[in-house]
Amino acid sequence: MTLRKLNVPGPKAQALLQRDAATISPSYPRDYPFVMARGKGTEVWDVDDNRYLDFAAGIAVCATGHSHPDVVRAIQQQAERFIHISSDFYHESWIKLGEKLDEIAPFKEDALCFMTNSGAEAVEAAIKLARYHTGRPRFIGFHGGFHGRTMGALAFTASKAVQRQGFFPAMAGVTHVPFPNTYRPRLAFDPAKSDYGDAVIDYIEKVIFTYECPPGDVAAFLVEPIQGEGGYVIPPQSFFSRLRKLADKYGILLIVDEVQSGMGRTGKWWAIQHWGMEPDMVCSAKGIASGMPLGAMIARKSIMDWPPGAHGNTYGGNPLSCVAALETMRLLENGYMANATEMGTYTLEALEEIAARHPSIGQVRGIGLMIGVEFVKDKATKERAPDIRNAMVHSAFEHGLLLLGCGRNTVRITPPLNVAKAEIDEGLEIFESALTEAEKKLL
């Protein structure tokens, strides 16, 4: 099928791009020139009135779609009452949000929350608390992980070298180990075993803890249940249960970064719930408030033992963000998480059919509406094809579909959790058409 090709960027977009270049930092990793004017649900329009389907959702942020009327109404009503009160004082929506996060926390013990503005700040809070509570100085992170760009979070981020280039030294004390990517294993399997998750755990205990990092010095593991920026990588089933046992054996805390994978994206409140493992802390942001700036570090009550003044935040738990989060969570609970499961299954099946027709798709993987498609030059050798991924993403933009890459050669598919089946069908039509274009040029 031949699809319409948009004339982008249009004249209004071009004028704004010039103004942006004159005043805004060049560090933002922008991939193509989309200049947004308005959005509704999964649909967005640019300043030249070109319509798109948004399968990026603001990096998995717009969980309830763009400008959901119930979320907008909650923000408007709160803004009429008051917009800001610092964390030196109290307000009811802050308390209600803490109660809700305690209710849905992925562990049985009562939870306490620290409200932030972003995922990176939630990670910073978690690593500070881990050091304070354990009295230990060191951490274990994972290759391919992304946890933010502030100096503490950056010490764990290892998805792309460019994210760390020029900023050494970051926070000291972080040792990185492989993440169990079964499509691209980096450690030899024990001949007696067939599970790559086991291989990674054995490597941590038998190699890292033996030669490099004494386990008694380690405050916490920090890990994404599903790697986001690193390529939407899903570990094998055994990995988290064994990681939990390893952490317990040495008195190490287990922090899960659910900034991208949490808040219903995988069909459950938290992706870690698909593995049946209870962490000690969870970091949340992105989809928690439908686009309002908010994050949260949620910890077992017994762990959050730091005193007043040990950590603080001026804007975290902002009243507008809190009411947006409460309304977002109500919508997720009342149908949108279930839709993520249903539409995720439908999308994965459709992508597998597309993969069978296209030599450049090496693997389709995902849970719920957190889906990655990895591109290769050859399915047998699995040689990475970032050029095909990049060309396909740009072609999709020109035909009215917003996508974002992740990892070195993967594209993520993360539409709003209330996306309709007809929108999935339309988006995948553009996806396949754009991929056909890219393959003709590059294969």
Image (spheres, helix red, strand yellow):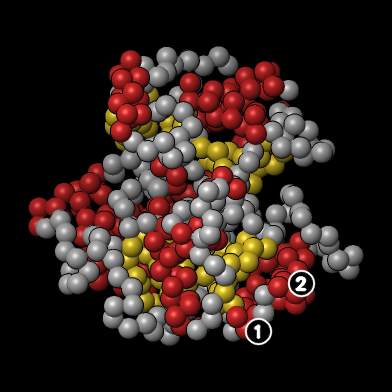
Q: Residue furthest right?
A: 191
Question: From what the image shows, is residue 219 above or below residue 152?
Answer: below
Q: Position of residue 421 (x, y in %)?
A: 48, 37
Q: What separation in Å lies between label 1 and label 2 (alpha carbons)? A: 16 Å
Q: Position of residue 166 (x, y in %)?
A: 53, 48
Residue kind at label 2, given as amino acid type = Val
| Residue identifier under label 1 | 249
Please, what secondary structure does the residue beneath circle 2 have? helix
Q: In the image, what residue occupies the spot 40% across and 52% down? A: 286
Which quarter of the rendering shows the C terminus?
Answer: top right
Which quarter of the rendering shows the N terminus?
Answer: top right
Q: In the image, what residue occupies the spot 9% across and 53% down? A: 80
User: As drawn, is 227 to the left or to the right of 357?
Assistant: left
Please, what secondary structure does the residue beneath circle 1 have? helix
| Residue identifier under label 2 | 207
Residue kind at label 1, given as amino acid type = Lys
Q: Position of residue 150 (x, y in %)?
A: 43, 57
Question: From what the image shows, is residue 15 above or below residue 373?
Answer: above
